[in-house]
Amino acid sequence: MQVPAPFEYRRVGSVPEAVALLDRLGDTARLVAGGHSLLPMMKLRLANFEYLIDINDLHGELGYIRAEPGLIRIGAMTRHRELLESDQLAAAFPVFRDAERVIADPVVRNRGTLGGSLCQADPSEDLSAVCTTLDASCVIQGVDGQRVVPMSEFHQGPYETSVGDAEMLTEVRLPVRPNGSSAYEKVERRAGDWAVVSAGAAVWLDGDGLIADARVGLAAVGPNTAGIEGIGDALRGRPPGEELYAQAGDIAAEACSPVTDRRGSAEYKRHLARELTVRVLRRAVARIHGTDGQGV
């Protein structure tokens, strides 16, 4: 059995305490909440840290979903199960419930957190694609205060984020806009597995029923979760329909950079990127009109 290299365990009770400890220990330390991605990497010696800082006691401080005018704020310690069960979040962004239904299993969803998912920065991670689709902003706390980073800048590369050694992600902010909806679809080899390819879409319509804006995010098709540039420009100001969805699917397929591996060939993944983009756009628009879009 593979085991991690030796490390020291610390437990903190507040955000300031966690940040101060990170500042003192530097890059030898790593925060852990659910640990379902971090600990397997440590067992395989793909990641080694001298200190693990347990932040589960911060759930009372950072485990929340709060709606404000034009904004939903989600604490970084909010569990997957809480995201799945929040009717308030599902009403504003059904893409979250779509994604949470296909993330891992109940054991993982009961312990894993939004912040842990984003900070792991795995290219196949579901919630990174969701937050990219929704144009989220990430609040990062350091010893000198807070800074806000758009999701487009949060991921620096595979398993790398803009969170510094003496900082931690504390909150994700999602702008709420009228007359919009969203959807998420995932192809996986078995239930709860990492994605072969997944796609999320958010669409907003104007008063004339034309597309005011649209965003698509993909996972498992390149070194980073991909927010597909060009789709908003291609769809904006046009009536939604199958021809337009197909055009967006072509853009998504061309923009991604999948590799051949045991989950499938690059050609197959590019096909999935195209098809899933069409499906999530269709479903998001159907939801604006009051239907779910399933089976369309």
Image: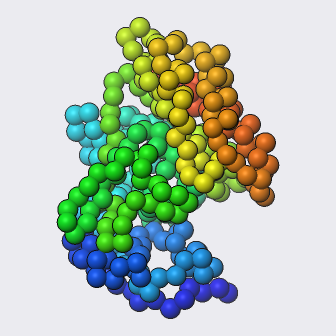
Q: Position of residue 283 (x, y in %)?
A: 56, 27
* Image height of 15 relative to 210, above or below: below
Q: Residue at x 30, y 59 (%)?
A: 140
Residue at 42%, 19% in the rendered image? 212
Could you say where residue 251 lies in the image, as x and y percent from the top left? 63, 30
The quarter of the rendered structure image containing the N terminus is bottom right
In the displayed structure, does residue 217 sit left or right of residue 55?
right
Name which quarter of the figure residue 176 lies in: top left
Tell me what residue is drawn at x 53 percent, y 58 percent: 157
Q: How is colour applied across the structure in the image?
A: rainbow
Residue extending farthest to the top is 208
Q: Position of residue 159 (x, y in %)?
A: 52, 63
Looking at the image, which is closer to me, 60 or 217? 217
Could you tell me which residue is drawn at 59 percent across and 47 percent down?
A: 219
258 left or right of 125? right
Q: Position of residue 260 (x, y in %)?
A: 77, 53
Is any part of residue 19 visible from this angle? yes
Figure disc tally: 0
In the image, residue 98 sits, relative to residue 112, either above or below, namely above
Q: Is residue 287 visible?
A: no
Q: Is residue 150 above or below residue 116?
A: above
Q: Nearer the viewer, residue 39 or 22?
A: 22
Query: For this view, does 246 lie left or right of residue 111?
Result: right
User: Image quadrant of residue 71?
Assistant: top left
Quadrant of the frame with the C terminus: top right
Outermost residue, bottom direction? 6
